[in-house]
DNA sequence: CAGCATCCGTATACGACGTAAACATAGCTG
DNA sequence: CAGCTATGTTTACGTCGTATACGGATGCTG
C-alpha cells in the first residue's frame, strides 16, 4: 500500500500535490477570482477552500476569519491599483512638475476607476469594509494609497486641514462615481426593445413620468471623462479658490 | 386549561395580543430600529421575529426574503427622507423661483445627509443594494426620489442627456460624501491622547509619515458645509458652463 | 347563527454557513 | 533517527435563510 503520501481522492487544485499548497497571496487571488466569476455571495470559506482543493479550515492559517478575508480582498484591489500606477509611470522618477499634483490625482483616480471596472463584483466591498474598519486598521495597501494622495497634496503646499478636506472630497467623488457607474440599469439584457430592456414596464406609469423619459439617458455611463470633469470641478473651487 | 387562545409565554410585543400583530410598516420599522441599535449584522429573520414577538417565518408574509427586507430598509430610509422634505417645505406650494433648481438639489442633498447621519448603521445598504438592484426594481420611494431630482432638472431646461449627467454627478457626490463622512476614524474612543485614540501606533511608522501627521485633520468631518460646497462646485462647471 | 374560504402565525426540517478544538501528518532541524 | 513546528483535516456546534405543512382565527356568505 505504499506506506505514505497516498493519492487520496479529492486532491485536485495544484500540481505540487503535497503540503505547501497555500499562501496568503494565492488564497486572496483565488478569492478575488471567485468573486469576479460568481459574485460576492459565492464567496464562502468552504467554497473558497474547494476552489483551492483544500478544506475550509485550512484558510484560517492565512486570514483570521471571513471579515479579515474580505479586508484582504480590499487589499488585493489596492495592490492591483499600486501595480497599475507603477507600470504606467514607468521607471522614470516622479513627475515633479509645478502644479502636477492635479494630474497626479487624476492619474490615481483613473487607475482606481479602471481597477473597479475590472472587478465590479468586488466594488461593494470598498464601501462596506471602509464603513466597518477604522482608519488605523485598514490594510496596508489602502493606507499607502492614502499616503500617496496626501503626499501629493502636502508637496503642493496645503496645510493639514486643507489637505484633509481635499482628500475627503477626492475620495468621496471617486467612490461615489464608481458606485453610480456600476449600478445595474438593465433589467433584462436579452430584450431588444430599450424600454423593456430597462424594465420600465415594472415602474408605476403615472407617478414617474420624467424618470421614464430620462431612464435611457440615465443608463448611459459617464465614463472616465465624467470622472475627470467632476474631479476638476471639485479641485477648482475647493482648492485654488480656497 | 382554558381551551383556546391561552396566554402562551412569549407573547410580548404588542398589546392587541391577537392576530393582526404585524404589517409591513411595523416590520420595517422594527428592522430599522434593530439595525440602528445593534448594527446590520444583528438583523436576522429570527432575531427580528423575536423583536416583534413572532416566529421568523411570519415575516415572510411581509417581505419575500431577506434581500427584499433589506430593500425594504432602503425604502424606509427614503420614506423618511420624503417626510423630512415635506415637513421642511411646509404646506406652501413648490418654490418655483427662476434658478431655484439649485437650491432644490441642495435641500434634497442636505435632507439625505441628515437621514444618513440619523441611521449610520444602515448606510452601507444604500451602497450595496443599489449595486445589486437594477433601476426598475428599486423601491418606489427611491424611484420617487429620482423623479423629484429629475423633475427639478427638466424644469430648469436640461435635456435628457444633460439631466442624466447632472443626476449622476449629484448622486455620486452625495453617496460618496456620506460614505466618507461616516467612515470610522477612531480606533479606541476611551483613549484621551488623540494619536492613540486614532490608533496610529498600529500603523507602520516609516512608510506612512504624512498620513500620521494628517490623520487628526482627516478625522474631522466636512459637515453639511462640505457637502454643499462640493455640490456647488460640481453644479457650477458641470452645468452652467456646460 | 353555521359553514367555509382566507388570512396569519407556528412547527418542523434541511442544507449551508462561520468557526472552535482536537488531531494528523509533512518537512525541517538537530 | 528524534523531535519540533508548520500545515491541512476532522469533527462538531450554533446560527442562518427558507421550503413545506399545518392549525387556528377572521371575516364573508348563507
Image (cartoon, coloured by chain):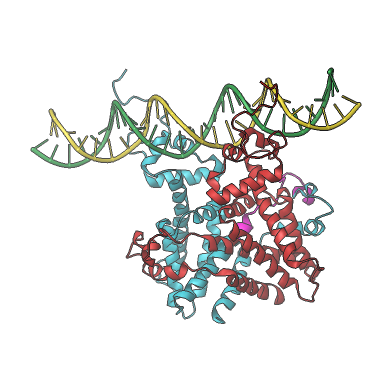
Chain colours: A red, B cyan, C yellow, D green
Most distant residue in the front direction: A1
Return the residue nearer the eye: D27 or D1: D1
- Does D10 sit above or below residue A221? above
Could you say which quadrant of the image residue A212 lies in? bottom left
Residue C11 drawn at (x, y percent)? 38, 25
Residue A1 drawn at (x, y percent)? 66, 20
- Does A86 sit above or below residue A231? above
Return the residue nearer the eye: B69 or A82: A82
The quarter of the picture where the C terminus of chain A appears is: bottom right
Find the magenta span and give its range: B177-197
- Does B234 sit above or below residue A111? below
Report whether residue B96 is seen: no
Residue B123 drawn at (x, y percent)? 55, 53
Q: With A13 as the anchor, is B60 left or right in this view?
A: left
**Count of marks, rendered view:** 0
Identify the residue shown where x is 59% and y is 32%. A10
Identify the residue shown where x is 82% and y is 57%. B209
Q: With A93 as the anchor, is B112 left or right in this view?
A: left
Return the residue nearer the eye: B157 or A51: A51
Q: Is residue A237 magenta?
A: no
Report whether residue B34 is seen: yes
Amino acid at each position: 500500500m505504499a506506506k505514505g503520501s497516498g493519492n487520496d481522492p479529492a486532491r485536485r487544485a495544484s500540481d505540487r500535490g503535497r503540503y505547501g499548497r497555500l499562501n496568503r497571496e494565492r488564497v486572496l487571488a483565488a478569492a478575488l477570482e471567485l468573486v469576479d466569476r460568481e459574485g460576492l455571495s459565492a464567496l464562502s470559506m468552504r467554497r473558497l477552500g474547494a476552489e483551492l482543493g483544500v478544506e475550509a479550515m485550512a484558510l484560517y492559517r492565512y486570514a483570521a476569519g471571513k471579515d479579515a478575508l474580505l479586508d484582504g480582498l480590499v487589499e488585493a484591489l489596492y495592490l492591483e491599483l499600486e501595480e497599475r500606477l507603477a507600470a504606467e509611470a514607468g521607471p522614470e522618477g516622479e513627475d515633479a512638475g509645478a502644479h502636477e499634483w492635479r494630474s497626479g490625482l487624476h492619474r490615481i483616480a483613473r487607475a482606481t476607476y479602471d481597477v473597479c471596472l475590472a472587478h465590479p463584483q468586488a466594488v461593494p466591498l470598498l464601501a462596506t469594509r471602509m464603513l466597518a474598519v477604522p482608519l488605523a486598521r485598514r490594510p496596508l495597501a489602502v493606507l499607502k494609497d492614502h499616503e500617496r494622495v496626501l503626499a501629493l497634496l502636502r508637496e503642493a503646499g496645503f496645510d493639514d486641514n486643507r489637505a484633509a478636506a481635499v482628500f475627503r472630497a477626492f475620495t468621496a467623488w471617486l467612490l461615489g462615481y464608481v458606485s453610480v457607474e456600476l449600478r445595474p440599469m438593465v433589467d433584462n439584457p436579452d430584450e431588444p426593445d430599450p424600454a423593456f430592456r430597462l424594465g420600465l414596464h415594472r415602474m408605476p406609469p403615472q407617478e414617474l413620468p420624467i424618470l421614464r423619459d430620462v431612464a435611457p439617458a440615465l443608463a448611459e455611463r459617464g465614463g472616465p471623462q465624467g470622472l475627470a470633469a467632476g474631479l476638476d470641478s471639485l479641485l477648482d473651487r475647493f482648492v485654488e479658490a480656497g
